[in-house]
Image: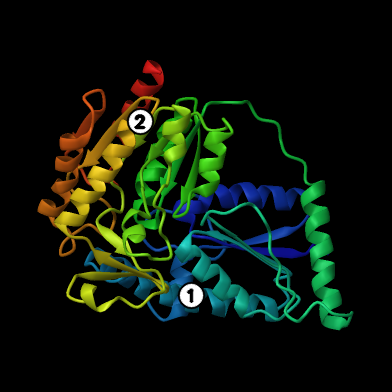
Amino acid sequence: MSKTIVLVATLDTKGDLVQYIKERIEKQNFNTIVIDPGVMNTPLIKADITREEVAKRGGKELSELVEAAKMGADRSKATEIMIKGVTDITRELYETGKLDGILSIGGSTGQAIGTAAMETLPVGVPKLMVFGMGGKDITRMPAVSDVLGLNRVTERILSNAAGAIVGMVDMEMPERKSRPLIGLTSYGVTTPCVLHTKTLLDENGYESIAFSVRAQVLEEMIMQGTVDALIDITPAGIYESWYDLPLAQPNRMESAGLMGIPQIIVPGSLDFINFGRMNIPAEFMDRISHKHGPHVTLVKTTKEEVFKAGTELANRANRSKGPVAFVIPLNGFSASDIPPYYDREIDLAFGEAVKKTANNNIQVIEVDAQINEKKFANNLFEAIIDLLKSN
């Protein structure tokens, strides 16, 4: 009898990835069960256990969560409901013999949901979390106990490890045509923009690769000549470097300028500072804050901070050896940049700083749209095509 691997991912943003891995797993004669804990947008593929079912198991109707999100509720509230639903369903699947292993794919929120589902399962059940938070592709498998001597627990863990490495080595990659590769940077709050842009690139003969939060590996790939152009939608880590926060990246994405590849710079997510798991320091307590997920707190930036960020990025663009353009949304820098969080006067400071600082050969395109509208992605696509043609 074939064994079953459960796949957990938000299908509105990760559906294409889940479909790919589902097909690869089923080709090896395993069964799959797909669980969708997404909330807001339309799933890209059909789930075996739908988001409506997950929400109901978590104690709410999905429509309630969607309506609350539209009214500006913290994203963490919906995440908590979906975590409860997924963990209950996962435990039930295991207890009824319908789960032999589990794999999840996601960013910060997807990782919180996926790992919560895995935590409900006993030691020894194969669990794999694929997360988009940067770093090399090193698969880490905790041994649970210290790695000293064999016993019934360590033998199960080591058997899983042996099976994992043999499976990875033995899995053949399908052949595909080589196309120009465009790097993208993403956060959960700019994911719709990234997906719209990716769709346009895919439909017009390009490939794209997106990196979230920390982009060191993208930097390496640019320096190695793997990436042909960059759309820096989410230049995260700038503010965090000023305040010595965990996600600080004072010199992020300088490789594009050094290599002279075409690049677009967007102020995605520059409407907030990400304090991650840290408690908000006293000097920030009077600002508007937003709970993005179980371990992510976002604090509203000031006009002075946004202006300074624009100046820093313009100075970086001035040093670039290749063509650069700024594309700036005038109606919000992220999914969180909506009333009462949105402040147009603060956001406009970014464009003011760029136009004051950037060299004359650097184009500044202002778009009357919110960053996650398709209209804005259309402008990004047109801008990168123009730079590629001019390079």
Residue in view at x 29 percent, y 30 percent:
325
Secondary element type, mark 2: helix
| Residue 13 as seen in the image, left or right of residue 135 | left
Number of labelled discs? 2
Secondary element type, mark 1: helix
Mark 1 Cα shell of 10 Å, populated few (<14), some (14-19), many (≥20): many
| Nearer to me, 94 or 224 | 224
- Give coordinates of residue 196: x percent, y percent: 38, 41
Residue in view at x 35 percent, y 45 percent:
193
Q: Amino acid at mark 1?
A: Ile
- Give coordinates of residue 163: x percent, y percent: 82, 61
- Residue projecting furthest to the left: 345
The disc at residue 140 is none
- Give coordinates of residue 364: x percent, y percent: 22, 31
Residue in view at x 40 percent, y 26 percent:
321
Residue 374 makes an appearance in the image: no
| Nearer to me, 391 or 208 | 391
Mark 2 Cα shell of 10 Å, populated few (<14), some (14-19), many (≥20): some
The disc at residue 83 is 1
Within the image, what quadrant is residue 149 found in? bottom right
Q: Earlier in the sequence, mark 2 or mark 1?
A: 1
> Dot 2 corresponds to which residue?
381
Q: Is residue 225 above or below residue 94?
A: above
Q: Please name which of the two marks, 2 or 1, marks the residue nearer to the observer.
A: 2
Residue in view at x 70 percent, y 72 percent:
142
Q: Amino acid at mark 2?
A: Phe
Label 2 vs label 1: CA separation? Answer: 36 Å
Q: Is residue 378 above or below residue 95?
A: above
| Residue 87 as seen in the image, left or right of residue 41 | right
